[in-house]
Image (cartoon, rainbow, N blue to C red):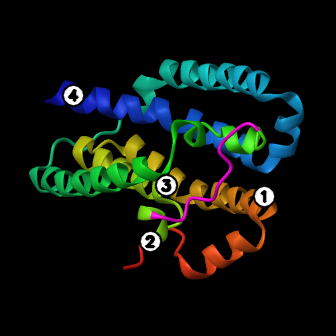
Amino acid sequence: MNSLRYYLALLVVMGVPPALVFWISIHPFVKFWREVGVWRTYVVHAAMILAVGVVVFQLRETLLRARFGPQPVLMAVAVVVYVLAIGVALQRRKGLAVAQLVGLPELAPHRADSRLSTSGIYSRVRHPRYLELLLFLLGHALLTNYLAVYVALGVCLAGFPVIVYFEEKELRERFGRQHELYCARVPRFIPGF
């Protein structure tokens, strides 16, 4: 169980920084990346993601040194959080294609399905993808009980609103009044019922 917890913590520590680098570099500079082109953008970001991943992997022992050991109560709460995350993920998958997950509509709005998702889970929360990721990260933090995973969760809690700010700015430019009306009736992160 300890090695499973370690590798899960390593996966989080290696996955979160590259993902944040990708989205934080895409959304604020989407017009620039559109000029660069889709495939060049993906190649540049693949290189950045690989570089960040290599650096984090080299630092893994230092990053994963602080651990608090398995805590049965936290593990039980983690299971509940995972169930919630899986529920959000299953609903999110119905309304968000893979092309949208990798940013194709942002980079090439003329080539990708460029409709505003407002049905299903998107009628209850504007950003279920980020809610899903935060729930999974919380579950991973509680299960692994590594300081680095809690830090990754905190970085995402701070970083996701920044990413969303730029993402929504781009959506307003693309969808105009339709997006404004959608934002007025649907909450950003906490689902409405």
Residue that mark 1 sits on = 174
Q: In the image, what residue type sits under mark 2?
A: Arg
110 in relation to 45, above or below: below
**Residue situated in front as seen by the camera: 93 or 44:** 93
Label at residue 124: 2
Question: Which is more foreground, mark 3 or mark 4?
Answer: 3
Upstream in the sequence, badge 3 or badge 2?
2
Secondary structure found at label 3: helix
Determine whether, in the image, residue 66 is placed left or right of residue 188.
Answer: left
Q: Does any portion of residue 64 appear in the rendered image?
A: no
Label at residue 4: 4
Q: Does any portion of residue 46 appear in the rendered image?
A: yes
**Residue situated in front as seen by the camera: 52 or 35:** 35
* Spatial separation of the CA atoms under disc 3 and disc 4: 25 Å
Q: In the image, what residue type sits under mark 3?
A: Tyr
Query: Magenta part of the protein: which range?
Result: 111-119
Whether residue 118 is in magenta: the answer is yes
Secondary structure found at label 4: helix
* Spatial separation of the CA atoms under disc 3 and disc 1: 21 Å
The 10 Å Cα crowd at callout 1, few under 14, some 14 to 19, many 20 or more, is some
